[in-house]
Amino acid sequence: MPESLLPPPPPPPLSPRRDLTAGLVVFLVALPLCLGIALASGAPLFSGLVAGVVGGIVVGLLSGSHTSVAGPAAGLTAVVAAQIAALGSFEAFLVAVVLAGVVQIALGVARAGFLSAFIPSSVIKGLLAAIGVILILKQIPHVVGHDPDPEGDFSFFQPDQRNTFTELIDTVDDFHTGAAVVGVLSVLLLFGWDRSKRLKKSPVPAPLLVVLLGVGLSALFRTLGGEWAIEPKHMVQVPVAGSFSEFLGFLRHPAFEHLSNPAVYFAALTLAAVASLETLLNLEAVDKIDPRQRNSPPSRELIAQGVGNVASGLIGGLPVTSVIVRSSVNINAGGQTKASAVFHGVLLLVSVALFAAWLNVIPLSCLAAILLVTGLKLASPALVRQMWAGGRHQFVPFATTVVAIVFTDLLVGVMLGLAVAAGFILWSNARRPLRVFREKHLRGEVVHVELATQVSFLNRAALAKIFDEVPTGGHVLLDARGTDYIDPDILDLIRDFDEVTGPARGVQVSLVGFRKRYHLEDRLQYVDHSTRDLQEALTPVQVLQILKDGHERFHTGRRITRDLSRQVLATAGGQHPLAVVLSCIDSRAPVELIFDLGVGDVFSVRIAGNVTSANVLGSVEYACAVAGTKLVVVMGHTRCGAVSAAVGLACSGKSAREATGCQHLDHIVDEVQRAVDVPACGGVDKLPPDERQAFVDAVARKNVQLVVRRALEQSTTLAELVRDGRIMVVGALYDVATGGLEFLPQG
């Protein structure tokens, strides 16, 4: 079997060890991010660490997500900086964080998380790819020791009037030799580790080795001195407390006297809206890359994030959201349950409280290498190819989201991506809002208009054009069975055509599937069953064409719309079928379906092998001479069990009773065997399956032609009706494998 057709390998079994190692890796990456985001936001450095601890422990315990990791978000830095400046103090800002958490809890209780279901997958995948591109662009300078901007500043335009690309250019002339060696070796180690199956199964995670390598090389380079020594500004810089009381002094608390300031409430609503939207977006994105493809409850996540923000605000932390960078690192490191997120929060708390000085010997370049490799996985060429293959309605919103996020920020980019995706939906809906096809009913042509699932005012012009094109004296069927919503403007247009415009032009309007609230009663005004006057008016050739057209509809999946209960009532007082079909009892050859006919349109005589007998001919004679049908069709089919049995018995010389134990089957087999060339079937059993089936199908074809001839030979009634031109007798062979039908020449 080709490798592309093999099912994907099952995810590894749940393992606490994998969660612990993943939590350790996330901790190492989250540490500089928490500090950098706080610095970029204009907030105290310790507030970023507090948010990281709360996001890991509090949100991790309450969240319903298995792989999402919460903490301070780079996407909120501009909002946080603006609100701190507007409120005048960080303590006043903390009040807004607490209130924002309360708002998020209310949103979660109100189940506002359902909004995440309306985000197109093209935008979500664009978000993932954009974060990957940003990680690559932003981490390259840190990998080689160019650290003028804090880790975690992911915005394109920076406070120092530089941008992402100018920082890359500056890196050419400003890199640190020791840090660059650590960074490059770390990237190579991570790539080599990923490509070795044995190393990937190792209990020691590669990012931990990268950190140990960075610390060891940093110590070595310190002895070399000069350009090799990695300075503190190229290291993690955690605030170090000399005592427990000094550590507690790092914590800030909200000044609730600012509750009287209206600006605090505006800031709270702004933070709640932005943080909730970012959480929902990131939650959808994380679920996309979860190897187990689990769904996270979005409303529960809003509640968890709200509780986290209340807690973070009370003890001096930045606002928290679900964060795609840490979450993707968690998944890449093998995180399987939320235990990894909680463990990373515990490590942050313990290490910052007890081992801050030890953390400050970790070079930023080795941590940047971990993020760089994560970015390469998120922005993979395979993802771009997949979106390109999905067509422009998938690729354009995807590409717009990527470019916009890279050059602006996450929320602006997502909004632009959503706008482009919505534009494609509206454009597609305006171009092909309705499915229109013409149905050939027994009484004439009906223009069938199948309304879309959502019919908005944008569809008014298209529907008005269809109404204008209905010919005078025509018939239109409006089908709303698959419709969930119809705009009031469209309903007014339909009512006007039904009550005024249509009748003035002699156009009849039929309605089906309209809900009660639309105040449009379902009705079919065309005759969709055979009547006496129709039967008398048609010629045998016209009836044959009706059957051919019906089969064409069946074969192409365009069966006409019928109200079967209405047909039952209409035919209860009498029947006037147009044709009689002699066919096999095979369940794969239902006559009414094959010819797309309704109740009362056709007589059906079914017998194994579609053979004749006195009883069969009596039924056919009654249908033609008494009931007035104009056409007799003898319909055989391929892969017929009766024909196959007749061939096998003819070649073996056995009787049906001897072979099957059926008492009366010989009568049918004998009739079918008239079409079998016994001398030619001697080696049939030795033929390959395909050739043997072709032989049996050829016998089925010949059997149909013999039945047509024998019916006319044995029934003078039918022969006279044919001579008088009142009926036709034709043969047909139905292919049960393809659904095709071939009308046979008599022979």
Image: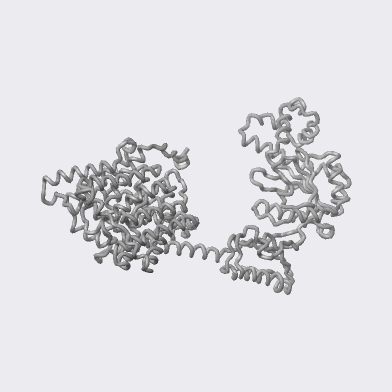
Vertical arrangement, residue 498 with respect to residue 321, above or below: below
Which residue occupies the foreground of this view, 471 or 573? 573
Question: At 45% from the left edge and 42% from the top edge, which residue is drawn?
Answer: 4
Task: Assign the C terminus to one quadrant of the image.
Answer: top right
Vertical arrangement, residue 241 with respect to residue 462, above or below: above
Q: How far from the left and from the top, in percent, is residue 140?
A: 26, 54
> In the figure, is residue 435 to the left or right of 602?
left
In terms of image quadrants, where is residue 321?
A: bottom left
In terms of image quadrants, where is residue 413?
A: bottom left
Q: Residue furthest front?
A: 257
Query: Is any part of residue 364 visible from this angle?
Result: no
> In the figure, is residue 220 to the left or right of 292?
left
Q: How far from the left and from the top, in percent, is residue 133?
A: 33, 55
Q: How far from the left and from the top, in percent, is residue 391?
A: 47, 57
> In the figure, is residue 169 to the left or right of 392?
left
Report the number of numbered marks: 0
Which residue occupies the foreground of this view, 49 or 605? 49
Query: Is any part of residue 1 visible from this angle?
Result: yes
In terms of image quadrants, where is residue 3?
A: top left
Q: How far from the left and from the top, in percent, is residue 682?
A: 69, 29
Question: At 29% from the left edge and 52% from the top edge, which residue is drawn?
Answer: 49
Q: How is the image coloured?
A: one colour
Which residue occupies the foreground of this view, 32 or 147? 32
Which residue occupies the foreground of this view, 477 or 370? 370
> In the figure, is residue 133 to the left or right of 488?
left
